[in-house]
Image: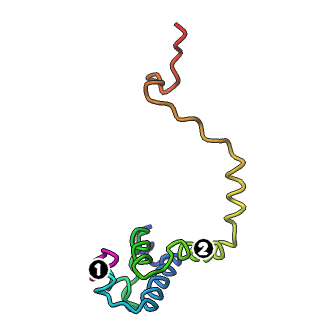
Amino acid sequence: MGQKEHASAPINVDTLRLIRAGFAEAGMTQVELARESGIPRSTLANILSPTAEPRLIHVEQLVKIAVAVGADARTWMAELETRERARRGDRGDELAGRRSRERPAPPVQKRAARGRSGKPRDDKG
């Protein structure tokens, strides 16, 4: 799946809607938002334009914009998670339960404690 397909994915479109609503509620200009978020104004213009093709939003951009407009990024993420779970038919809890019943991850060993084969060394002589 390419960047264009990801940009048009429902979760990304929902993200764009949250950002646009937060920007509208903040009553800021794009220049003010650019200054507060550290994101170039031209990038923000593409994100905020309702007529532009959807643009892929990165987590860093989402968080910076949320902070700049005075929103709680955790609230936005929770809303996006709720929408995604609804789209999936709320299978998330079922999958999380199944994962927790799987074997625990093996302990991490320092490289020096492993032999060349990747198996632990037998230091018994």
Marks 1,2: beta carbons within 8 A: no
Q: Position of residue 25 (x, y in %)?
A: 46, 91
Q: Which residues are magenta?
A: 36-42
The disc labelled 1 sits on which kind of residue? Arg
Element at label 2: helix
Element at label 1: helix
Q: Which mark is residue 35?
A: 1
Q: Nearer the viewer, residue 26 or 76?
A: 26
Q: Nearer the viewer, mark 1 or mark 2?
A: 1
Identify the mark nearer the N-term, 1 or 2. Answer: 1
Q: Which mark is residue 73?
A: none
- In the depicted structure, whether residue 21 falls above or below residue 76: below
The disc labelled 2 sits on which kind of residue? Glu
Is residue 92 found inside the magenta-colored segment of the image? no
Quarter of the image that includes the N terminus: bottom left
Q: Position of residue 11 (x, y in %)?
A: 52, 76
Question: Residue at point 43% right, 23% down?
Answer: 116
Left or right of 66: which side holds 92? right
Q: CA distance from mark 1 to mark 2?
A: 31 Å
Q: How is the image coloured?
A: rainbow
Q: Nearer the viewer, residue 31 or 121?
A: 31
Residue 106's quadrant in the figure? top right
Q: Position of residue 79 (x, y in %)?
A: 58, 77
Question: Residue at point 68% right, 58% down?
Answer: 96
Q: Which mark is residue 84?
A: 2
